[in-house]
Image (spheres, coloured by chain):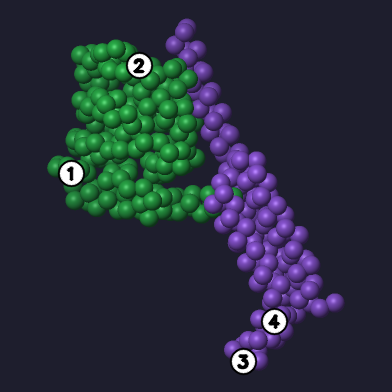
Amino acid sequence: MSRYFLLLLLTTPFILLSILSALTKYKLGRSTKKRFIVQFITWLLVFIGLASAETIYIWLFQHKLTQTEPLSLFDVIQISAIIMIFYIANRSRAKIETLEKRMQDLHQELSIRLSDKNRNK
Amino acid sequence: MTKKEIKYKICIVIPAYNESTAIGDVISDVRDTFKHCDYETEIVVVNDASKDKTGIIAREQGATVIQHLLNSGAGGATATGLSYAEQNGFDIAVTMDADGQHSSKDAIKGIDELIKRGDDLLIGSRLINSKGMSKAKIIGNRGLSFVTYMLFGIHSTDSQSGLRVFSHRALESLRWKTSGYEFCSEMLWRAKQLNLRISEYPIEAIYTDYSKAKGQNNWNGVNIVKSLLRRRIAELMG
């Protein structure tokens, strides 16, 4: 199996999951159209870059624009890990933000209710 | 609807953190000025977990005190005050700084203007007439207004002003995510997203030695810009 194909195989699930998650958020009204488009284009560019990595490398090599070695197995693992980390980091950030907002709302509501109680005493 | 036909319920929200020196005077000034108005008013001080006697003094002065359990920042305290106003059926809310920087006459002027113009969010701009303001403050505030314009496409001469007037529609719908001083710019952005009517009116900034010492310095502006940039990127990424 080509190492470039292996790279695509390892990273495609994360790209698809990200696009699916962005689409779901948009369809459920939790995200704007503009935000969905930006997310979709970002992940699409990542996918196109990975899918055409071999073609780009050959073209660059033939035109003497690069002299690096072709993709090694280590490179495949490293790039897959970077994509995975990017995916996890983005999801974690979104979850932390949601929790932070919920905590803020809870604190706000609690403060108002407690103050009302104090006032009625 | 005119002012005479309906007695508007006005909530004056004052977010405060360690303001025991000025809060008493601010509340009594607001109370005395609004006494001569046709509005039904309530002064609400959101004590953002102050370490001094801010809450006690505010209560002694007759204000409703909402005690934050944790320090949440200016954005968090303002959100709590406006949420209180919404839950208690106020028609209009006004936010003012607790350091005495704003004149309560300007607050009344803002309410009158909001009713007259039919706006949803009215910003009291210190920079339409920046007399009395230091050059450093003018540069800092203009810089942040420029950043707000570049990031969110909203033109405001004073995007960081704490004197703001909100309609009931704004109270019901306007929410923001940041809790520090950057909320001032984010609030304008959210208002724009909600298609609320935003406008400005000139106010006078009262700078005493105390308010100068308490106020933001331009280095804090760097943090505000960083936070706004993060918020803008995060909004795009999900």
Q: Label 2 is placed on what type of residue? A: Lys
- Which residue is tagged 1? B130
SS assignment at label 3: loop
Comes first in the chain, label 3 or label 4: 4
Residue at horizontal 62 percent and vertical 53 percent from the top? A90
Q: Chain of mark 2?
A: B
Q: Chain of mark 3?
A: A
Residue at horizontal 20 percent and vertical 43 percent from the top? B128
Q: Is residue A62 visible?
A: yes
Q: Position of residue B230 (x, y in %)?
A: 49, 52
Q: Label 4 is placed on what type of residue? A: Thr
SS assignment at label 2: strand
Q: Which chain is green?
A: B
Same chain letter for marks 4 and 1: no
- Which residue is tagged 3? A63
Distance (Cα) linking label 3 and label 4: 12 Å
Distance (Cα) linking label 4 and label 2: 69 Å
| Closer-to-camera residue (B211/B79) | B79
Mark number displayed over residue B9: 2
Q: Which chain is purple?
A: A
Q: Quadrant of residue B109?
A: top left
Q: Position of residue B221 (x, y in %)?
A: 35, 50
Q: Is residue B175 left or right of residue B120?
A: right
SS assignment at label 1: loop
SS assignment at label 4: helix
